[in-house]
Image (spheres, grey):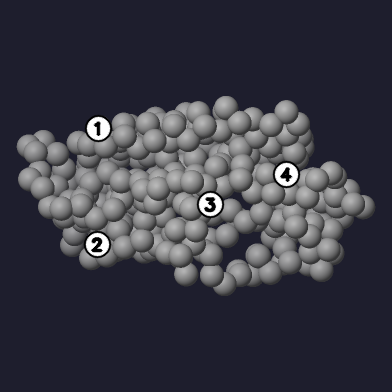
Amino acid sequence: MKRRWALAVAACLGLPLAALSGAGSPKKAEPVQAGKPRHIMSIDLCNDLLLMMLVPKERIASVTYLAHDAVEVLMPGADAGIAINHGAAEEVVSQKPDLILASPWATPVLRRLASKVDAPLVEIDSANSFADIRRITRQIGDLVGEPERAGALIAEMDRKLAYLERRRPARPVEVVAWSATNGVPGRGTLTDEIIRTAGAVNLAARLPGNNFSSFDIEELLAARPDAVMRGRATYDDLSLGDAASEHPVIRRAFKGRQISYPAFLHTCGLPQSADSALQLHAALGKLPKGRPPW
């Protein structure tokens, strides 16, 4: 199912499948140059994905147990044969990494243990913009000794962003990324950047405060966005959050105006987050004309 979805998206957007799989396709084993880390451990989902795009699996000690679903959508099979971890301190001892890619929320215990086993632990920030994605991709590329591969990923992302910039609509439609159970991403979020890049206006960016807000069904109906976006972790079964968003009133009010998007490309800032903007741009072009009829 996920493989078929990836192929369908590539065909719809006129992209080669490599645009979705990035540099994460299986690579032949190659000699590791001196100075490059040979046994890299990632204990953060977003770092997992970038790591698999940048280095062959022979150089990966482990990725998190959370990575598999995102990998199956983004680059099917790329994690085959790679060990997993649960971010536990004892796994640092057993897997013997020579570099650990972590989030800023890595535990002090893990930091201390990493120093004791001589494995540098580098905390990678989260991305809230395409500028952040460029910076983080270059940072990890430098850390793993693959700046050229990082540059290629960034160049492909920038090609897609330039394509979208040339096709900005004269009258942007208004959308909101909403579910009945989660916060609504507003200013300063990657979702807001993706929406604006796709040529739309993010309704939540007009709400008081920054980052995330929330509003209920009545407030959503009163706001009358042209479309409602719903993030999904996979493209198979609905989650409880998705089911809550399927309220009969929402289904009727936004018939033909609900757009699904890959949640991990909004949670994790990846070069392929530009694909989500491309997908959204294409979906916006298929919306019914005019404002919602209520």
- Give the Cα separation between the discs numbered 1 and 4: 37 Å
Residue 99 drawn above or below residue 4: above
Residue 47 drawn above or below residue 157: below
- Say the numbered circle drawn on residue 148: 1
Identify the residue at the far bottom of this view.
237
State which tag comes first along the sequence, 2 or 4. 2
From the image, tell me which residue sits under label 2.
82
SS assignment at label 2? loop
Tell me where residue 75 appears, x and y as whole percent: 36, 56
Which residue is at the front of the view, 62 or 31?
Answer: 31
Q: Amino acid at mark 1?
A: Glu
State which tag comes first along the sequence, 3 or 2. 3
State which tag comes first along the sequence, 3 or 1. 3
- Give the Cα separation between the discs numbered 2 and 4: 39 Å
- Left or right: 156, with 255 as reference point: left
SS assignment at label 1? helix
Tell me where residue 81 appears, x and y as whole percent: 23, 65
State which tag comes first along the sequence, 1 or 4. 1
From the image, tell me which residue sits under label 4.
175
- Say the numbered circle drawn on residue 12: 3
Q: Are marks 1 and 4 in contact (CB under 8 Å)?
A: no
Q: Amino acid at mark 3?
A: Cys
